[in-house]
Amino acid sequence: MGISGEICFLGNPYPNGHKLIEFVWSGRVEEDESLWFDFHLKTDSYYADDNKNEQEEERSDWNSKVVWENYQNCIISSTYWGSDGIKINKSSQKAVFNDFINQTLIVDSLPFNDDFEYDRLAFEIFLLGHDTCADHKLEISLNTENNYDIEWSGKIALSYLGDDKFNHDFVLKVQNIAFNGFYYPKSWSLEKADIFFKNNFEDYKDYQFVDLNPKSNKREYKFKKIN
């Protein structure tokens, strides 16, 4: 089944947006036991649904189909290049999953302070080259049991082209996405992971450990809600 969703880069030559061919929403636990959300998306080719072959006048990179076509498609991700993702703020010792998304997820709000560390951005983006994205706001709502709709907005600086100003916006909507589960440090035993999740999740019984490589002798698991 394909991904039901699209992303629009406001003011670019494709007002109808771009289809998503990959979208993964997952969580992870760090060694210090902090919890994080990760998101990864990839679009179809920018020109996939464009049948117009008009000759265009000289335009800015953002407005030029020729420039967009040169870069094929977009990736926004906290996993593809190993970015930070979004830290989950727990309001209690034990929580249910929906507690984590009952408010808008906000990260890398603009304007940045002078001492902001750009290498700690939540997400990296390949758009018209390796650009920069920030000011992310994600609204996540339960659609059906264990499936969610996500609305995501943010701003982009075409830093690969030498522009450090966040002059461009994107908006994304995706439907019926299942949460992919929580990954935990490879150094942890299954027993240690089990104790962590049991101590931190009120709805612990709604999850199971899923083998990541069932055909391999190497046992690695993620902690995922039972469908």
Image: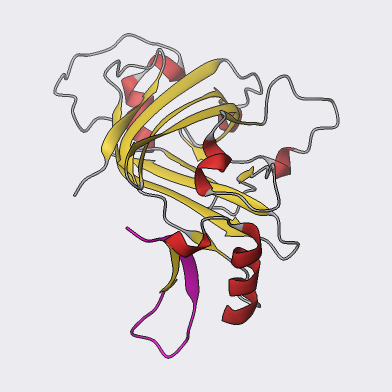
Judge left or right: residue 147 versus residue 110: left
Evaluate whether residue 36 shows in this view.
yes
The residue located at (33%, 24%) in the rendering is: 66
Q: Considering only vertical position in the picture, is 83 above or below 152?
A: below
Q: Nearer the viewer, residue 117 or 105?
A: 105
Measured as percent of width and height from the top left, residue 220 is found at 49, 78
Relative to 193, say whether 43 is above or below.
above
Q: Quadrant of residue 217?
A: bottom left
Q: Residue furthest top?
A: 57
Residue 145 falls left or right of residue 179: left
Q: Position of residue 5 (x, y in %)?
A: 29, 33
In the image, what residue occupies the spot 40% across and 27% down?
172
Please tell me how many numbered marks the rendered image carries: 0
Magenta stretch in the rendered image: 211-227
When the figure is inspected, residue 7 is found, relative to residue 78, above or below; the finding is above
Q: Position of residue 227 (x, y in %)?
A: 32, 58
Give percent across and percent down for residue 203: 51, 56
Residue at (46%, 22%) from the top-left corner? Answer: 170
Main SS of the magenta part reads: loop
